C-alpha cells in the first residue's frame, strides 16, 4: 500500500513544474513579482531581493502563479512573522517583511499604479504607523463546527477553509481574549450548528464590545444564544437571521470613537456608531487621514461642499467646522441615522444628511442646478466610475477622492480626466499594515 502511495505521489510530482526565480518587487494584492523565461509569475509571501524555488500552481499564456517551496537566498527584508498561522491565513499578506520595506513597497505600488499622473501630480510619502500591529478595532470572523467544536477565524487564502488562529496580532490582547470568551460561550449552545459568522467591534477606549452575530436557526435558538452569551459581558448584541433577515438588537449596540482637536480640526468630535455602519479599520490612521484631507482642501469657511458616501459623518463633521455647509449622501439607513445623531450630539448645524443612493441623488442635485465649491467622495472598493462625469458637470473648484482600492481610483481618475479634471496631489496612508491595502487621497482640480 505504502509503495503504491509513493508511486502515485511521485507521478504527481513529476507533473509539477518547479523553477528558481528572483523576486523583484511586491505588486498590488501582496504577491511578489518574479520572471521565468520572460513570463511574469506572481508568488505569494515572497520578499523582494530574494531567490526562491517555486512550485508553479498556475500557468497562463501571459502570466503564472507559484508558491515558495524553498528560500534559496533570503532577502535582507525578510523577518519571521509574528503570527504562527501566517502561512495559511488569508488575513495578512506582508508579515514576512520588515515594516520599513512594507512601506517602501506600498509607495512603489501606488506610484506604479498611478504612474500616468506623474506629470500632473505631487506624490507624498506614505504615512505609516509607529506600531504596525494591534491596530484594528473591528473584525469579521467565520464560524464552523469541526469535530463537535465551534471554531472561528478568517478564511485560508483563496479558499473557504477557516484558519482557527490562536491570536491575531492585528488586534490587541484584550480583543483576542474577548474573541475567545465569545466563542467559548457560543460553543456551549446546543444550536451552535446554526451559527454562520460574527463581527466584534470595540470602542476606542478599549472597554466596550459589541457583537453582531449571523445565524440560520430559529427564534428559540436566538434565545439560547443570547442566554449563553451573557457571561461575555458585551455592551450590545445584534442577532441576525440570514434566512428570515430578522434583526434583534439587545442592549446598547454602538461603539464610540473621537477625533481630537488639532491645528486642522477645530474642536474634538465624538462619534457614536452602530456596528453595522462602516467605520475605518484603524482609529489612529483615520485621524491622520482626516487631518490630511483638511490640509489638502485648504478651506476658507465659505465653501459649499457635497460629500458622497459619507457614512456616519467621519469626514463631514470635521470638514463642516471649516466651511459654510456640507450636504452629505449616504446609502445605508443605519449609517445615515448615526450621521444625523452625531451632528446633533456635537452641536453641528451646517451638515444636511440625505439617506439615499449617490448615483440617483447626484443626478437630482444636478437637475436642481445645485452648486458646490468642493466635491468630496469616499466610495467603497468598487469606486464610482458611473458618476465621475456627473461630478465634473458641477464644475467644483476642487474634488477630493479618498480611496481604499487603487485600481478603481486610477480607473475613475482616467474617466474624470476626460471631463476636465486632473489630480494635482496624492497622499498615501498605511491604514492596514501587514496587508496589501493602501488608503489614498487624491486632490483634483480643473485642467489648465
Ligand atoms: C468607504 S465607506 C466611507 C464612509 C465614510 N466616509 C467614513 O470615512 O467612514 C463607503 C460608504 O459608502 C456607502 N455606500 C456604498 N454605496 C453607496 C451608494 N450607491 N450610495 C450611497 N452610499 C453608498 C456605504 O454604506 C459606506 O458607508
Image (cartoon, grey):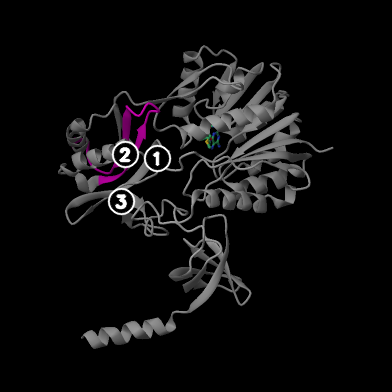
337 lies above or below 162: above
First along the sequence among labels 1 and 2: 1
Q: Which residue is mark 1?
A: 134
Residue stretch in magenta: 195-220
Q: Which residue is mark 2?
A: 173
Q: Position of residue 340 (x, y in %)?
A: 49, 19
Q: Position of residue 205 (x, y in %)?
A: 37, 26
> Is residue 249 visible in the rendered structure shown here?
no
| Distance from the alpha carbon under mark 2 to that under mark 3 | 13 Å
First along the sequence among labels 1 and 3: 1
For label 2, count other residues whose C-alpha is less than 10 Å away and answer few (under 14), some (14-19) or many (20+): few
For label 1, count other residues whose C-alpha is less than 10 Å away and answer few (under 14), some (14-19) or many (20+): some
In what quadrant of the picture does the N terminus appear?
Answer: bottom left
Q: Nearer the viewer, residue 236 or 164?
A: 164
Q: Position of residue 94 (x, y in %)?
A: 47, 54
Q: Nearer the viewer, residue 362 or 253?
A: 253
Amino acid at each position: 500500500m505504502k509503495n503504491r502511495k509513493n508511486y502515485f505521489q511521485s507521478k504527481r510530482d513529476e507533473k509539477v513544474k518547479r523553477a528558481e526565480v528572483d523576486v523583484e518587487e511586491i505588486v498590488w494584492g501582496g504577491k511578489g513579482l518574479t520572471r521565468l523565461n520572460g513570463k511574469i509569475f506572481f508568488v505569494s509571501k515572497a520578499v523582494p531581493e530574494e531567490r526562491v524555488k517555486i512550485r508553479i500552481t498556475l500557468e497562463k499564456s501571459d502570466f503564472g502563479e507559484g508558491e515558495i517551496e524553498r528560500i534559496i537566498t533570503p532577502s535582507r527584508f525578510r523577518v519571521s512573522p509574528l503570527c504562527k498561522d501566517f502561512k495559511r491565513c488569508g488575513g495578512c499578506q506582508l508579515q514576512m517583511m520588515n515594516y520599513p520595506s512594507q512601506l517602501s513597497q506600498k509607495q512603489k505600488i501606488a506610484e506604479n499604479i498611478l504612474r500616468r499622473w506623474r506629470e500632473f501630480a505631487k506624490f507624498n510619502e506614505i504615512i505609516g504607523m509607529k506600531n504596525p500591529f494591534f491596530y484594528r478595532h473591528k473584525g469579521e470572523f467565520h464560524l464552523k463546527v469541526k469535530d463537535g467544536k465551534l471554531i472561528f477565524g478568517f478564511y485560508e487564502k483563496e479558499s473557504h477553509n477557516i484558519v482557527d488562529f490562536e491570536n491575531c496580532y492585528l488586534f490587541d490582547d484584550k480583543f483576542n481574549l474577548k474573541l475567545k470568551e465569545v466563542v467559548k460561550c457560543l460553543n456551549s449552545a446546543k444550536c451552535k450548528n446554526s451559527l454562520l459568522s460574527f463581527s466584534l467591534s470595540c470602542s476606542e477606549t478599549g472597554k466596550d464590545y459589541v457583537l453582531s452575530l449571523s445565524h440560520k436557526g430559529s427564534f428559540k435558538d436566538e434565545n439560547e444564544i443570547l442566554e449563553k452569551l451573557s457571561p461575555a459581558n458585551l455592551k450590545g448584541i445584534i442577532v441576525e437571521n440570514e434566512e428570515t433577515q430578522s434583526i434583534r438588537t439587545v442592549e446598547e449596540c454602538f461603539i464610540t470613537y473621537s477625533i481630537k482637536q488639532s491645528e486642522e480640526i477645530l474642536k474634538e468630535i465624538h462619534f457614536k456608531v452602530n456596528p453595522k455602519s462602516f467605520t475605518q479599520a484603524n482609529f489612529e490612521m483615520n485621524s491622520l487621514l482626516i487631518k490630511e484631507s483638511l490640509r489638502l482642501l485648504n478651506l476658507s469657511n465659505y465653501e459649499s461642499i457635497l460629500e458622497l458616501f459619507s457614512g456616519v459623518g467621519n469626514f463631514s463633521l470635521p470638514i463642516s467646522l471649516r466651511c459654510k455647509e456640507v450636504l452629505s449622501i449616504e446609502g445605508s439607513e443605519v449609517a445615515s441615522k448615526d450621521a444625523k445623531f452625531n451632528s446633533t450630539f456635537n452641536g453641528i448645524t451646517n451638515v444636511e444628511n440625505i439617506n439615499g443612493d449617490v448615483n440617483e441623488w447626484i443626478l437630482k442635485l444636478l437637475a436642481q442646478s445645485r452648486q458646490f465649491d468642493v466635491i468630496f467622495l469616499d466610495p467603497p472598493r468598487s469606486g464610482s466610475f458611473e458618476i465621475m462625469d456627473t461630478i465634473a458637470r458641477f464644475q467644483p473648484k476642487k474634488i477630493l477622492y479618498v480611496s481604499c482600492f487603487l485600481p478603481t481610483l486610477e480607473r475613475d481618475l482616467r474617466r474624470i480626466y476626460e471631463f476636465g479634471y486632473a489630480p494635482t496631489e496624492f497622499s498615501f496612508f498605511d491604514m492596514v499594515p501587514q496587508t496589501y491595502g493602501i488608503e489614498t487621497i487624491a486632490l483634483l482640480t480643473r485642467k489648465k
